Image (cartoon, grey):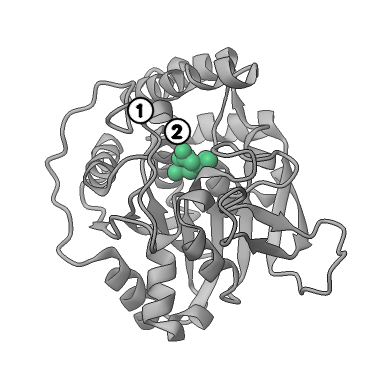
Amino acid sequence: MAARQIIIDTDPGQDDAVAILFALACPETLDVLALTCVAGNVPLALTTRNARMICELAGRSDLPVFAGCDSPLGRELVTAEHVHGRSGLDGPDLPEPAMPLQDRHAVDFIIETLRTRPSGTVTLVPIGPLTNIATAFTKAPDIIERVQDIVLMGGAHAAHGNVTPAAEFNIHVDPAAAACVFGAGAPLTVLPLDVTHKALVTPARNAAFRAIGTRVGDAVGALTGFYERYHPERHGADGAPLHDPCTIGWLLQPDLFSARRVNVEIETGSELTMGMTVVDWWGVTDRPANTTFVHDINAQAFFDLLTERLARL
Ligand code: BDR
Ligand code: CA
C-alpha cells in the first residue's frame, strides 16, 4: 500500500519536534509532503526556524517548510515560553538551520496541494493552533471535501484545560479557527489531553530515547528532558505529557488507542471558558457526531513504537 500523504501543520515546540521526527522515521507508512508552520508555542519566526532545525536533524533538508499565519483570527497571540523555553525548542544544542523557507504562504500551499492531488488522498495533521487550516478552508471552501482526514492534537474533555481551567492550549489560542475546523464537515480525529496526559515521558522512557545512542536519540532525550522540567512540578505526574506525537501514533497504529464518535463544539463567546471543547460524551443533544474523539492509549506500546522508529533516523 502506498504511504499516506500528510501535511504536518505545526508550532514547534519540543513535542511537535518529536512528532515530526516520528513521522519522518516512517516513510513506508507516512509520506510527509511538507511542514506548514503557524504561530503558537512561540511566534512564527521561531516556529519556522525550529521546524527547519528538526528537518536538518533528521537529514531531511529537502523537505519543504512553509511559513503560515503569524497571529490567530481576531485575537492576540498567546504563547507558551513558560513551557517550551524562549526558543520554543530549548533543551538540545542544535545548529541554526541552513535550509531555506519556501517562498509561498503555507495557506496557499495547503490549498494548492488539496486541489491538485487526487481528492481524498491528503491528510492534514495539525499539532498547533488551527489558524492555517481555518484560513485555507475559508479562502478555498472547495478543498474541504477533498481532505482525506484531519488528525489533530487539541482539546480536552475529562482531562480539563491546561492553559485555563476549561481550555487546552491549541484550541484556546485560536478558538475561532477551531470552530471553523470542527464545523467544516471534513473527517476529523482528535487526540485531546485525555489521551496525551496518559502518554507521559517517565525517566525510564527518557532513558530509552537516550539509549538509542544516535544524534536523534540524544536530541529527543534532551527535548523531552527539558519539557519534563515544567510538568511534574505542576501536575505531580511521573513525567511530562508527550502531546503531539500521539497524532502520528494514531496514524501508524490506531489499535493502540480507544476512541468514540461524539459531537464536539468550540466555545468562542465566553472569556471564562474561551476555547473549551464541549464534548457531548453521553449523546444528550441531537447534534450530529462530528469527531472521532480519542480518549485512551496503550502508553507503553506507544513509547516502544516511538523509540523503535526514532532509532531508524
Ligand atoms: C499542545 O500545546 C502545545 O504547547 C503543545 O505543542 C501541544 O501541541 C498541548 O496543549
Ligand atoms: Ca504543538
Name, please, the residue furthest toward the front. Answer: 271
Q: Is residue 74 left or right of residue 183?
A: left
137 horizontally vs 190: left or right: left
Task: Give 106 or 71, whichever is nearer the viewer.
Answer: 71
User: Residue 216 has which mark?
Assistant: 1
Q: Nearer the viewer, residue 82 or 56?
A: 82
Badge number at residue 292: none
Number of numbered markers: 2
Secondary element at image label 1? helix
Going by the numbered disc 1, the residue's amino acid type is Val
CA neighbours of label 2 inside 10 A, class few (<14), some (14 to 19), many (20+): many
**Which residue appears at 62% of the width and 52% of the height?**
276
Q: Quadrant of residue 74?
A: bottom left
Q: Residue 289: x and y, percent?
A: 75, 69
Q: Residue at x 28, y 64 (%)?
A: 106
Query: Is residue 20 visible to us here?
Result: yes
Q: With respect to residue 108, does 164 lie above or below?
A: above
Q: Is mark 1 within 8 Å of ligand 1?
A: no
Q: In terms of sequence position, does the residue under pointer 2 or pointer 1 come before the other?
A: 1
Residue 69 in percent (x, y) is at: 30, 60
Q: Mark 2 sits on what residue?
A: 310
Quadrant occupied by the N terminus? bottom right
Expressed as whole percent of the image width and height from the top left, the position of residue 164 reads 57, 39
Q: Which amino acid, by three-letter code, is at mark 2?
A: Leu
Q: Secondary structure at mark 2?
A: helix
Is residue 19 something that shows in the picture? no
Residue at (68%, 40%) from the top-left corner? 160
